[in-house]
Amino acid sequence: MDRFNDLTLFIQVAQVLSFSEASRQLGMSPSGVSRAIQRLEARLDVRLFQRTTRSLSLTPDGRVYFERGLQILEDLDNVELQLMQTQSQPKGVLRLDLSAAFGRLHVAPALARFTDQYPDLVVKVSLGDRLIDLNEEGIDVSVRVGDSPDSRLIVYPLARAPFIVCAAPEYLDQRGKPHTIEELEHHNCVNFILPQTGRAFAWIFQRNDTQVEQAVAGNLSFDSTEAVLASAIAGAGIIQVHDYIAGPSIQQGRLVPLLEDYKAEGKPLTIVYPQKRHLSAKVRVFIEFMKVLVSDLKAQHMLS
């Protein structure tokens, strides 16, 4: 057992190349982690790390031990996961954190199918766009739009969420269609205000394989993308939102896509969950459910 613990501790340090960061993740003191590595090196009679005052790196022996040890742990995880999947059915409470607009428009309406398929699960959902600490708030899995800066989380990419510019037919009948991004300066544009900064979100476009930002102006702004969408449907002006937000209204003819030659790639849509040795059955089946949901949205050209 001590050899197994030594190996897992070593791999944790080797992955982050920092005693202090490894100690934080393991809930140990930096000196305790350092002493454990020294004991392991003494037992193996090799030096695993090259230490300087500013950096930590693997020695050639350390690299071999890391690669073989990582494979051993992955093989063990795979065997245990196979056994768990054959004997364990998803049950208990599944706590989800969903990006607000994507969650309301696409995930929430589909969750009835998910709970019908897994009747022993109780699903509790929170909706919002602030970055939360999943471990601290007891969240099992999160669906986010944008990058995740927390290195303690597993990030599973699902798709890209492209930006689209659109407006109501009534607005375009009165003001006409813009054909270049520069022409937006002559239109009423509804802005989305970032709640974190209080500033308007910059409109992003693709021009000659380069993403560019275009300043726009108008007499309406909201800190909710769904409010931005509602105002556009009412004929207030032109908007830029993620395709998955405007997609249903475009399909219904309530909005008309514009400037499609300048359509920007947008941000990643990801599943995020805390690092654990085993992926629980309830998280695993939710990931599979999301894969199918996103595949359907891609078929409708709301994600890429």
Image: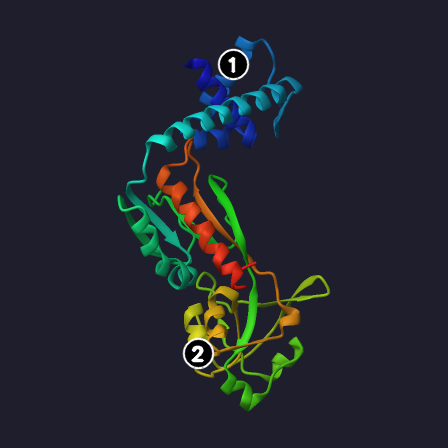
Q: Contact (CB < 8 A) between labels 1 and 2?
A: no
- The amino acid type, in three-letter code, at marker 2 is Ser
> Where is 13 relative to 300, above or below?
above
Quadrant for residue 71, please give it: top right
What residue did someone put label 2 on?
A: 231
Residue 209 drawn at (x, y percent): 71, 61
Which residue sits at x=70%, y=62%? 210
Residue that protrudes farthest toward the right in the picture: 208
Q: As drawn, is 7 to the left or to the right of 114? A: right
Nearer the viewer's eye, disc 1 or disc 2? Answer: 2
Could you tell me how many numbered marks the image carries? 2
Query: Is residue 74 visible from the viewing direction of this image?
Result: yes
Indicate the quadrant containing the N terminus: top left, top right, bottom left or bottom right. Answer: top left
Side of 86 where 271 appears, left or right: right
Up-down: is 191 above or below 57?
A: below
Name the N-terminal-most of marks 1 and 2.
Answer: 1
Q: Residues within 10 Å of mark 1 (few under 14, many from 20)?
A: some
Amino acid type of disc 1?
Answer: Leu
What x and y, as percent, mark residue 282? 35, 41
Q: Is residue 117 left or right of residue 232?
A: left
Q: How is the image coloured?
A: rainbow
| In this picture, residue 46 sits left or right of residue 113 | right
Q: Position of residue 113 (x, y in %)?
A: 34, 54
Q: Residue at x 43, y 46 (%)?
A: 287
The numbered disc on residue 40 is 1
